[in-house]
Amino acid sequence: MRISFIVIILGLLSALASAQENRSVDPSWLFVPESIESEELVIVEPVMGSNIPVELHFVEMLDGVYSPIGYRKPLGDGPFPTIVFAHMNGGYGLRWIREWTQYGSGTLEAFLEAGYAVVWMRYRAEVDTPYGSELTVREFQGRDRWSRGPLEYEDAIEILEYVKGLPAVDPDRLGWLGVSHGGEMLLKIASEYQGLRAGVASEPAAMDYLATLPQDSSLSPTVPQPETMEENSQGMQAAAVEYLRNRIDMEQAMSRINEIEMPIFVVGRDRDHNQATFRLAYDLMSEAGKTTQWKSYDHNHHGFIFVQRDSEGVYEPDAIQQLVLSDTISFFDGYMKN
Protein backbone atom coordinates (compact mmCIF):
# COMPACT_ATOMS: atom_id res chain seq x y z
CA MET A 1 0.00 0.00 0.00
CA ARG A 2 2.84 2.40 0.89
CA ILE A 3 4.60 1.77 -2.43
CA SER A 4 1.39 2.40 -4.37
CA PHE A 5 0.87 5.69 -2.53
CA ILE A 6 4.37 6.86 -3.43
CA VAL A 7 3.84 5.91 -7.07
CA ILE A 8 0.58 7.89 -7.13
CA ILE A 9 2.26 10.97 -5.63
CA LEU A 10 5.14 10.79 -8.12
CA GLY A 11 2.64 10.43 -10.93
CA LEU A 12 0.74 13.50 -9.77
CA LEU A 13 3.95 15.51 -9.52
CA SER A 14 4.96 14.37 -12.99
CA ALA A 15 1.57 15.33 -14.39
CA LEU A 16 1.77 18.73 -12.69
CA ALA A 17 5.22 19.33 -14.14
CA SER A 18 3.98 18.29 -17.58
CA ALA A 19 1.15 20.81 -17.35
CA GLN A 20 3.58 23.65 -16.66
CA GLU A 21 6.07 25.18 -19.05
CA ASN A 22 9.62 24.13 -18.30
CA ARG A 23 11.74 27.26 -18.13
CA SER A 24 15.05 25.49 -17.60
CA VAL A 25 18.05 26.10 -19.84
CA ASP A 26 18.61 22.33 -19.51
CA PRO A 27 15.02 21.01 -19.96
CA SER A 28 15.96 17.43 -20.83
CA TRP A 29 17.40 16.98 -17.37
CA LEU A 30 15.78 19.50 -15.06
CA PHE A 31 12.31 20.96 -14.54
CA VAL A 32 12.25 24.65 -13.58
CA PRO A 33 8.76 26.21 -13.32
CA GLU A 34 10.00 29.81 -13.12
CA SER A 35 13.02 31.32 -14.85
CA ILE A 36 15.96 31.85 -12.56
CA GLU A 37 17.44 35.17 -13.56
CA SER A 38 20.18 37.17 -11.91
CA GLU A 39 21.87 40.44 -12.70
CA GLU A 40 25.02 40.17 -14.78
CA LEU A 41 28.22 40.24 -12.78
CA VAL A 42 30.15 43.40 -13.64
CA ILE A 43 33.25 44.44 -11.68
CA VAL A 44 34.20 48.12 -11.81
CA GLU A 45 37.81 49.03 -11.04
CA PRO A 46 39.77 52.32 -11.19
CA VAL A 47 42.45 52.74 -13.84
CA MET A 48 45.80 54.23 -12.94
CA GLY A 49 46.09 57.89 -13.93
CA SER A 50 42.60 58.06 -15.46
CA ASN A 51 39.17 59.25 -14.36
CA ILE A 52 37.58 56.57 -16.57
CA PRO A 53 37.23 53.21 -14.76
CA VAL A 54 37.18 49.80 -16.40
CA GLU A 55 34.14 47.55 -16.33
CA LEU A 56 35.08 43.87 -16.28
CA HIS A 57 32.39 41.78 -18.01
CA PHE A 58 32.19 38.05 -18.63
CA VAL A 59 30.91 36.97 -22.04
CA GLU A 60 29.44 33.53 -22.68
CA MET A 61 31.00 31.69 -25.59
CA LEU A 62 29.34 29.17 -27.93
CA ASP A 63 30.24 26.23 -25.70
CA GLY A 64 29.15 27.84 -22.42
CA VAL A 65 32.55 28.93 -21.08
CA TYR A 66 33.19 32.61 -20.39
CA SER A 67 35.74 35.10 -21.68
CA PRO A 68 36.53 38.37 -19.87
CA ILE A 69 36.55 41.81 -21.44
CA GLY A 70 37.56 45.20 -20.07
CA TYR A 71 35.19 47.96 -21.24
CA ARG A 72 35.72 51.70 -20.89
CA LYS A 73 33.82 54.61 -22.38
CA PRO A 74 34.21 58.38 -22.55
CA LEU A 75 32.25 60.49 -20.09
CA GLY A 76 28.59 60.81 -21.09
CA ASP A 77 25.81 58.50 -22.18
CA GLY A 78 26.80 57.88 -25.79
CA PRO A 79 26.14 55.98 -27.93
CA PHE A 80 29.82 55.93 -28.81
CA PRO A 81 31.74 54.42 -31.72
CA THR A 82 33.63 51.53 -30.17
CA ILE A 83 36.91 49.78 -30.92
CA VAL A 84 37.66 46.24 -29.75
CA PHE A 85 41.38 45.51 -29.28
CA ALA A 86 43.04 42.10 -29.74
CA HIS A 87 46.65 41.46 -28.76
CA MET A 88 48.33 38.52 -30.44
CA ASN A 89 47.42 35.05 -29.15
CA GLY A 90 44.80 34.37 -26.47
CA GLY A 91 44.75 32.94 -22.99
CA TYR A 92 45.56 34.19 -19.46
CA GLY A 93 42.00 35.37 -18.79
CA LEU A 94 41.00 38.08 -16.33
CA ARG A 95 44.50 38.71 -14.99
CA TRP A 96 45.66 39.59 -18.51
CA ILE A 97 42.83 42.12 -18.88
CA ARG A 98 43.71 43.73 -15.55
CA GLU A 99 47.44 43.93 -16.26
CA TRP A 100 47.07 45.39 -19.75
CA THR A 101 44.38 47.82 -18.64
CA GLN A 102 46.74 49.27 -16.04
CA TYR A 103 50.09 49.06 -17.85
CA GLY A 104 49.51 48.52 -21.58
CA SER A 105 46.65 50.83 -22.51
CA GLY A 106 48.37 53.89 -23.95
CA THR A 107 46.74 53.20 -27.30
CA LEU A 108 43.32 52.75 -25.72
CA GLU A 109 43.77 56.02 -23.80
CA ALA A 110 44.39 57.79 -27.13
CA PHE A 111 41.18 56.34 -28.57
CA LEU A 112 39.21 57.33 -25.46
CA GLU A 113 40.50 60.86 -25.84
CA ALA A 114 39.39 60.77 -29.48
CA GLY A 115 35.82 59.94 -28.42
CA TYR A 116 35.76 56.15 -28.75
CA ALA A 117 34.65 53.54 -26.24
CA VAL A 118 37.31 50.82 -25.98
CA VAL A 119 37.36 47.11 -25.17
CA TRP A 120 40.28 44.87 -24.26
CA MET A 121 39.32 41.30 -25.01
CA ARG A 122 40.57 37.80 -24.22
CA TYR A 123 39.73 34.62 -26.07
CA ARG A 124 40.93 31.04 -25.96
CA ALA A 125 44.51 30.37 -27.01
CA GLU A 126 45.31 29.54 -30.62
CA VAL A 127 45.32 25.82 -31.36
CA ASP A 128 46.69 23.69 -34.17
CA THR A 129 43.22 22.69 -35.37
CA PRO A 130 43.13 23.43 -39.10
CA TYR A 131 41.34 26.68 -39.78
CA GLY A 132 38.54 26.34 -42.32
CA SER A 133 36.76 23.27 -40.96
CA GLU A 134 33.05 23.89 -40.51
CA LEU A 135 31.67 24.22 -36.98
CA THR A 136 28.31 22.45 -36.61
CA VAL A 137 26.20 21.53 -33.62
CA ARG A 138 23.75 18.69 -33.04
CA GLU A 139 21.55 17.64 -30.15
CA PHE A 140 23.13 14.92 -28.00
CA GLN A 141 21.43 13.66 -24.83
CA GLY A 142 19.51 16.90 -24.56
CA ARG A 143 22.55 19.14 -24.89
CA ASP A 144 24.84 20.49 -27.59
CA ARG A 145 27.55 18.43 -29.22
CA TRP A 146 29.96 20.26 -31.51
CA SER A 147 31.82 18.91 -34.52
CA ARG A 148 34.99 20.49 -33.10
CA GLY A 149 35.93 22.92 -30.36
CA PRO A 150 35.24 26.59 -31.15
CA LEU A 151 38.30 28.56 -32.25
CA GLU A 152 39.54 31.85 -30.90
CA TYR A 153 38.16 33.97 -33.75
CA GLU A 154 34.73 32.43 -33.09
CA ASP A 155 35.09 33.56 -29.49
CA ALA A 156 35.81 37.02 -30.86
CA ILE A 157 32.57 37.07 -32.88
CA GLU A 158 30.60 36.21 -29.74
CA ILE A 159 32.35 39.04 -27.90
CA LEU A 160 31.59 41.49 -30.72
CA GLU A 161 27.91 40.58 -30.57
CA TYR A 162 27.94 41.08 -26.80
CA VAL A 163 29.68 44.46 -27.04
CA LYS A 164 27.03 45.64 -29.49
CA GLY A 165 24.45 45.23 -26.74
CA LEU A 166 26.19 47.44 -24.18
CA PRO A 167 24.06 50.53 -23.47
CA ALA A 168 26.60 53.21 -24.45
CA VAL A 169 27.85 51.40 -27.57
CA ASP A 170 26.60 52.33 -31.03
CA PRO A 171 26.12 48.85 -32.55
CA ASP A 172 26.44 50.23 -36.07
CA ARG A 173 29.87 51.75 -35.37
CA LEU A 174 31.97 48.88 -34.10
CA GLY A 175 35.61 48.52 -35.13
CA TRP A 176 38.54 46.18 -34.53
CA LEU A 177 42.25 46.76 -33.99
CA GLY A 178 44.39 43.65 -33.66
CA VAL A 179 48.10 42.97 -33.78
CA SER A 180 49.86 39.86 -35.07
CA HIS A 181 47.48 36.92 -34.51
CA GLY A 182 44.88 39.49 -33.48
CA GLY A 183 45.34 41.02 -36.93
CA GLU A 184 44.91 37.67 -38.65
CA MET A 185 41.73 37.11 -36.62
CA LEU A 186 40.31 40.31 -38.13
CA LEU A 187 40.68 38.76 -41.59
CA LYS A 188 39.06 35.52 -40.46
CA ILE A 189 36.20 37.42 -38.83
CA ALA A 190 35.70 39.66 -41.87
CA SER A 191 35.30 36.60 -44.10
CA GLU A 192 32.42 35.26 -41.99
CA TYR A 193 30.86 38.16 -40.08
CA GLN A 194 29.50 41.47 -41.32
CA GLY A 195 29.04 43.25 -37.98
CA LEU A 196 32.16 45.42 -38.08
CA ARG A 197 32.30 48.88 -39.67
CA ALA A 198 36.10 48.98 -40.15
CA GLY A 199 39.26 47.33 -38.88
CA VAL A 200 43.02 47.66 -38.53
CA ALA A 201 45.19 44.56 -38.98
CA SER A 202 48.58 45.50 -37.55
CA GLU A 203 51.36 43.09 -38.52
CA PRO A 204 48.77 40.38 -39.30
CA ALA A 205 50.35 36.94 -38.99
CA ALA A 206 47.98 35.64 -41.67
CA MET A 207 49.83 32.50 -42.73
CA ASP A 208 46.89 30.29 -41.73
CA TYR A 209 44.30 32.59 -43.31
CA LEU A 210 46.22 32.76 -46.59
CA ALA A 211 46.39 28.94 -46.72
CA THR A 212 50.18 28.84 -46.79
CA LEU A 213 51.40 25.47 -48.00
CA PRO A 214 54.09 23.49 -46.14
CA GLN A 215 57.61 24.53 -47.04
CA ASP A 216 60.18 22.10 -48.39
CA SER A 217 62.39 21.48 -45.37
CA SER A 218 65.44 21.38 -47.63
CA LEU A 219 64.76 25.01 -48.56
CA SER A 220 64.21 26.20 -45.00
CA PRO A 221 66.96 28.42 -43.58
CA THR A 222 69.22 26.58 -41.14
CA VAL A 223 69.26 29.62 -38.85
CA PRO A 224 65.83 31.18 -38.22
CA GLN A 225 65.55 34.89 -38.95
CA PRO A 226 65.29 37.17 -35.92
CA GLU A 227 61.88 38.74 -35.37
CA THR A 228 63.40 42.11 -36.29
CA MET A 229 65.85 41.87 -39.17
CA GLU A 230 68.88 44.15 -39.41
CA GLU A 231 67.99 44.96 -43.01
CA ASN A 232 64.94 44.37 -45.19
CA SER A 233 65.20 46.54 -48.28
CA GLN A 234 62.33 47.18 -50.68
CA GLY A 235 63.91 44.71 -53.09
CA MET A 236 64.19 42.05 -50.41
CA GLN A 237 60.58 42.62 -49.42
CA ALA A 238 59.32 42.39 -53.00
CA ALA A 239 61.20 39.14 -53.57
CA ALA A 240 59.85 37.66 -50.33
CA VAL A 241 56.28 38.58 -51.27
CA GLU A 242 56.64 36.93 -54.67
CA TYR A 243 58.13 33.81 -53.10
CA LEU A 244 55.26 33.61 -50.60
CA ARG A 245 52.66 34.18 -53.32
CA ASN A 246 53.86 30.95 -54.93
CA ARG A 247 53.55 29.05 -51.64
CA ILE A 248 49.88 29.65 -50.89
CA ASP A 249 46.74 27.88 -52.00
CA MET A 250 45.56 30.82 -54.09
CA GLU A 251 42.07 29.43 -54.72
CA GLN A 252 41.47 28.92 -51.02
CA ALA A 253 42.95 32.27 -50.04
CA MET A 254 40.88 34.20 -52.58
CA SER A 255 37.68 32.39 -51.67
CA ARG A 256 38.13 33.79 -48.17
CA ILE A 257 39.19 37.26 -49.23
CA ASN A 258 36.28 37.57 -51.66
CA GLU A 259 33.88 37.40 -48.69
CA ILE A 260 35.32 40.53 -47.07
CA GLU A 261 33.03 43.58 -47.21
CA MET A 262 34.54 45.92 -44.60
CA PRO A 263 37.42 48.39 -45.09
CA ILE A 264 40.71 47.15 -43.62
CA PHE A 265 43.91 49.10 -42.96
CA VAL A 266 46.93 46.77 -42.99
CA VAL A 267 49.87 48.01 -40.92
CA GLY A 268 53.29 46.60 -41.79
CA ARG A 269 56.67 46.76 -40.05
CA ASP A 270 59.60 47.24 -42.39
CA ARG A 271 62.09 44.84 -40.80
CA ASP A 272 59.69 42.24 -39.45
CA HIS A 273 60.57 38.69 -40.49
CA ASN A 274 56.91 38.21 -41.53
CA GLN A 275 56.63 41.43 -43.51
CA ALA A 276 55.95 39.45 -46.71
CA THR A 277 52.85 37.93 -45.09
CA PHE A 278 51.55 41.34 -44.04
CA ARG A 279 52.09 42.77 -47.50
CA LEU A 280 50.65 39.81 -49.40
CA ALA A 281 47.45 39.96 -47.33
CA TYR A 282 47.08 43.58 -48.39
CA ASP A 283 48.01 42.90 -52.03
CA LEU A 284 45.44 40.13 -52.41
CA MET A 285 42.68 42.24 -50.87
CA SER A 286 43.60 45.09 -53.20
CA GLU A 287 43.63 42.79 -56.24
CA ALA A 288 40.18 41.52 -55.21
CA GLY A 289 38.86 45.10 -55.26
CA LYS A 290 38.42 45.35 -51.51
CA THR A 291 38.51 48.67 -49.65
CA THR A 292 41.95 48.47 -48.11
CA GLN A 293 45.05 50.54 -47.47
CA TRP A 294 48.64 49.83 -46.56
CA LYS A 295 51.34 51.63 -44.62
CA SER A 296 54.53 50.25 -43.15
CA TYR A 297 56.61 51.69 -40.32
CA ASP A 298 60.23 51.10 -39.28
CA HIS A 299 60.01 50.19 -35.60
CA ASN A 300 62.18 47.86 -33.56
CA HIS A 301 59.38 46.03 -31.77
CA HIS A 302 56.67 43.67 -32.97
CA GLY A 303 53.36 44.92 -31.60
CA PHE A 304 54.57 48.53 -31.49
CA ILE A 305 51.04 49.83 -32.08
CA PHE A 306 50.19 49.09 -28.43
CA VAL A 307 51.82 51.72 -26.20
CA GLN A 308 52.97 50.53 -22.76
CA ARG A 309 54.04 52.44 -19.67
CA ASP A 310 57.77 53.18 -19.43
CA SER A 311 60.01 52.54 -16.41
CA GLU A 312 58.60 55.68 -14.77
CA GLY A 313 55.05 54.41 -15.19
CA VAL A 314 54.24 56.94 -17.92
CA TYR A 315 52.84 56.49 -21.42
CA GLU A 316 55.43 58.12 -23.69
CA PRO A 317 54.89 56.87 -27.26
CA ASP A 318 57.88 57.37 -29.50
CA ALA A 319 57.63 59.28 -32.78
CA ILE A 320 56.66 56.20 -34.83
CA GLN A 321 54.03 55.14 -32.31
CA GLN A 322 52.60 58.65 -32.32
CA LEU A 323 52.40 58.46 -36.11
CA VAL A 324 50.67 55.06 -36.23
CA LEU A 325 48.20 56.20 -33.58
CA SER A 326 47.39 59.29 -35.59
CA ASP A 327 47.05 57.27 -38.79
CA THR A 328 44.79 54.60 -37.28
CA ILE A 329 42.54 57.07 -35.46
CA SER A 330 42.19 59.04 -38.69
CA PHE A 331 41.32 55.82 -40.53
CA PHE A 332 38.58 54.95 -38.05
CA ASP A 333 37.30 58.52 -37.99
CA GLY A 334 36.73 58.30 -41.73
CA TYR A 335 34.43 55.29 -41.36
CA MET A 336 33.11 55.53 -37.81
CA LYS A 337 32.25 59.20 -37.43
CA ASN A 338 30.34 59.85 -40.65
Image (spheres, grey):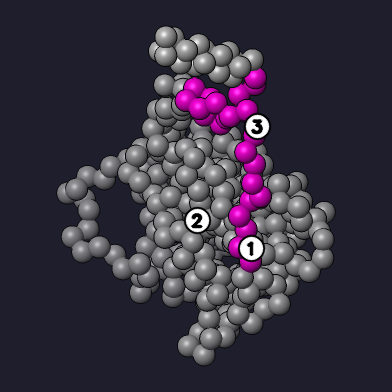
The quarter of the image holding the C terminus is bottom right
The vertical placement of 303 against 131, above or below, is below
Proximity of marks 3 and 1: CB atoms separated by less than 8 Å: no
Residue under numbered circle 3:
34
Q: Amino acid at mark 2?
A: Arg
Q: Position of residue 170 (x, y in %)?
A: 76, 51
**Of pointers 3 and 2, the one earlier in the residue sequence:** 3
Q: Looking at this view, name the residue that lies furthest to the bottom.
A: 312
Q: Is residue 260 magenta?
A: no
Please tell me which residue lies in front, 215 or 163: 163
Q: Residues within 10 Å of mark 1 (few under 14, many from 20)?
A: some
Q: Under tag 1, what secondary structure?
A: strand
Residue under numbered circle 2:
122
Residue under numbered circle 1:
55
Q: Quadrant of residue 257?
A: top right
Side of 218 relative to 264 (left or right): left
- Residue bounds of the magenta highlight: 20-44
For image coordinates 69% across by 47% down, the residue present is 164
Please tell me which residue lies in front, 95 or 79: 95
Between circles 3 and 2, the one closer to the viewer is 3
For image coordinates 50% across by 56% down, the residue present is 122
